């Protein structure tokens, strides 16, 4: 879904949609439209899931002028996998991804969010799996229980990815106001490694690992715009896939997880056009699209 960039950045396109001010090569639909339906054979979202997702879209449409997506054709809905994304806008980030993802998607989120009024029941209804962060559960007495609970949560998310559904994590672990990713934690890599094992045990192909970029022209401004960009699945080297999914010593497994974490961090920097401020992000997004248009 790429178009030739215009010089003005605001002229209407021939299909009648308006150009995005900070990314003139991408046409924005006039309304928040439903994502592409999943292909035959993909897991079918339940009626409750579809209803709750419709509520999420409606709430987003009340705040944002437009929400759109690019790169949905990169999502292998017949395969399943793990989405990893930057986290620049709190609970809005999963809502934006969910609203534009063309199939069923299960998020992992810190357990405290599931206790919030309104948001909590909505997240639980969508199947969100709680993640128990050490920062939220300080104290040595409960550390073992927290780790056990986290292991069960990661196992549940990995099982979704291995079975052909999609799961999503924000590997930074917390939201922030920076225009580039902060420190990437190993949870996403460990989840993906576990999904590889479960998929192999079930005789299924390896799940995909997709970086996702989230962009807001003015994230705290009412009636602003949001863009979610689904990138190509991450090309994980075969040798690393074997190390992640095969039996090995603990030290080797940790090294493999760290190597994958580094790959995820690099991919997220590319997906979010890492920069020190949002104006530079907009410029980089436009330049990258122009370069692709000339290829």
Image (cartoon, helix red, strand yellow):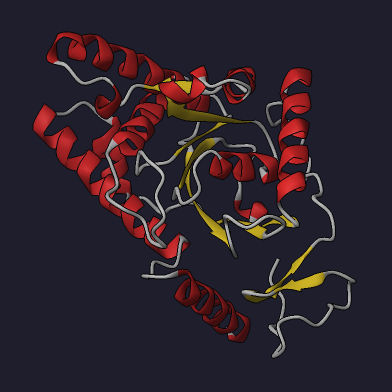
- Is 221 situated left or right of 113 in this image? right
Q: Which residue lies furthest to the bottom in this view?
A: 7
User: What residue lies at 41% left-to-right and 55% top-to-bottom?
Assistant: 177
Is residue 271 in view from this perspective?
yes
- Is 144 situated left or right of 293 in this image? left
Which quadrant would residue 269 be assigned to in this image?
A: bottom left
Report the front residue among 73 and 6: 6
Could you tell me how many numbered marks the image carries? 0
Q: In this view, does 168 lie above or below 31?
A: above
Is residue 38 in view from this perspective?
no
User: Which image quarter holds the C terminus?
Assistant: bottom right
Residue 149 in percent (x, y) is at: 33, 13
Q: Is residue 115 above or below residue 7?
A: above
- Is 157 situated left or right of 262 in this image? right
Residue 46 in percent (x, y) is at: 74, 20
Report the front residue among 141 and 231: 141
- Is 140 situated left or right of 6 in this image? left
User: What residue lies at 45% left-to-right and 36% top-to-bottom?
Assistant: 206
Report the front residue among 66 and 154: 66
Residue 242 in percent (x, y) is at: 28, 38
Which quadrant would residue 118 be assigned to in this image?
A: top right
User: Which image quarter holds the N terminus?
Assistant: bottom right
Q: Is residue 256 above or below residue 149?
A: below
User: What residue lies at 84% left-to-right and 78% top-to-bottom?
Assistant: 12
């Amino acid at each position: 879904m790429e178009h030739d960039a215009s010089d003005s950045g605001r002229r209407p396109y021939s299909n009648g949609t308006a150009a995005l001010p900070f990314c003139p090569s991408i046409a924005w639909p006039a309304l928040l439209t439903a994502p592409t339906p999943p292909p035959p054979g993909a897991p079918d979202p339940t009626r409750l899931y579809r209803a709750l997702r419709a509520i999420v879209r409606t709430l987003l449409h009340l705040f944002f002028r437009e929400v759109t997506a690019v790169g949905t054709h990169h999502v292998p809905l017949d395969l399943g996998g793990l989405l990893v994304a930057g986290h620049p806008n709190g609970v809005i980030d999963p809502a934006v991804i969910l609203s534009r993802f063309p199939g069923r998607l299960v998020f992992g989120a810190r357990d405290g969010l599931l206790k919030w009024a309104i948001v909590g029941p909505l997240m639980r209804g969508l199947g969100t799996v709680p993640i128990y962060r050490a920062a939220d559960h300080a104290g040595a007495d409960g550390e073992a229980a927290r780790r056990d609970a986290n292991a069960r949560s990661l196992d549940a998310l990995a099982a979704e990815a291995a079975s052909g559904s999609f799961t999503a994590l924000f590997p930074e672990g917390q939201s922030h106001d920076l225009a580039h990713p902060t420190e990437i934690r190993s949870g996403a890599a460990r989840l993906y490694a576990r999904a590889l094992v479960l998929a192999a045990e079930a005789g299924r192909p390896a799940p995909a690992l997709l970086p996702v970029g989230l962009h807001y022209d003015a994230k705290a401004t009412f009636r602003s715009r949001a863009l979610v960009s689904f990138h190509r699945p991450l090309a994980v080297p075969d040798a690393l896939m074997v190390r992640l999914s095969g039996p090995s010593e603990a030290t080797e497994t940790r090294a493999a997880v760290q190597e994958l974490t580094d790959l995820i961090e690099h991919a997220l920097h590319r997906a979010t056009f890492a920069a020190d401020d949002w104006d530079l992000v907009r410029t980089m997004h436009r330049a990258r699209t122009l370069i692709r248009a000339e290829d």
